[in-house]
Amino acid sequence: MGYYVGDVPAQDLVIEPARNEEPIDLTPFNEIDAQLFDPAGVPVVTPGFLGSISGETIVIEWPGSSPFDVAGIYALRLTATHTTTNVRERIPAVRLVVDVEDGWHTLDTARDDWRDAPGYDAWLYELLWSARQQVCAYAPALATGQRPPLSYLRAQIMQARNLWNAGKVDPASGGMGDDTFVLRPFPLDWMIKQVLRPQNPRPVIA
């Protein structure tokens, strides 16, 4: 689920909890406690979330103020309990991507340019962030506050795609698949370097 810094979501968050791809039976529980943690792992201080159980889903009502002060991947940790039987179970955390419009690609702009981008928001965010770091390390430095030019954005998408393809390769079999992904180091190739630092193919005669 993708949001932006400062968002106050209007729609409730509906979660179908699962563990190891198997649905979690919510029948033994009647209450949900929700706590949001920022990208640094620090609890977000908010008026609180309202959690409830509806059949096989968990419904989270957002607080009335924005819980998103910084960009990154947040973790919404859920605990299911019962008021009388004292059962208690931690539900796998929900990862929420929060973007900021600073000139670099967001999930939305990346998917406009990369139509077969990974559907899982957290994976795509990690790819874009890693590609951005590599682009910044190689390309001419930007001035403070300067927004990246088009060539930097194109290089970011190209490198994110390379990282995605490299991360889908199974080292044991050499096969590829979308079900698993491991972010592996992958250097900028010559095409991306040419986008960032074009070389004059013609010799210069002094």
Image (cartoon, helix red, strand yellow):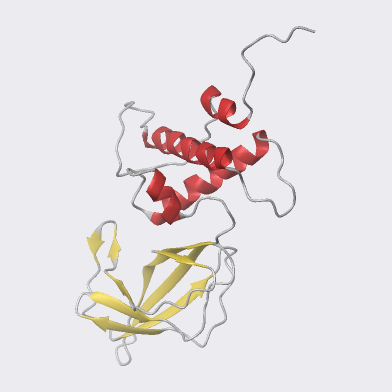
Determine the residue located farthest toward the bottom in the rendered image: 84
Going 30% across and 29% down the picture, which residue do you hit? 175
Would you place residue 1 above or below residue 51 in this image? above
Left or right: where does residue 96 sit relative to residue 136? left
Would you place residue 122 above or below residue 42 in this image? above
Residue 32 rendering spot, x and y as whole percentages: 35, 82
Going 54% across and 69% down the picture, which residue do you hit? 5
Point out the image quarter for the C terminus: top right
Residue 30 rendering spot, x and y as whole percentages: 28, 86
Residue 20 rendering spot, x and y as whole percentages: 29, 56
Left or right: where does residue 139 sit relative to residue 14? right
Point out the image quarter for the N terminus: bottom left
Going 46% across and 78% down the picture, which residue do you hit? 8
Q: Quadrant of residue 101?
A: bottom right
Which of the two residues, 109 or 120, is positioned nearer the viewer here? 109
Which of the two residues, 87 or 5, is positioned nearer the viewer here? 5
Would you place residue 12 above or below residue 92 in this image? below
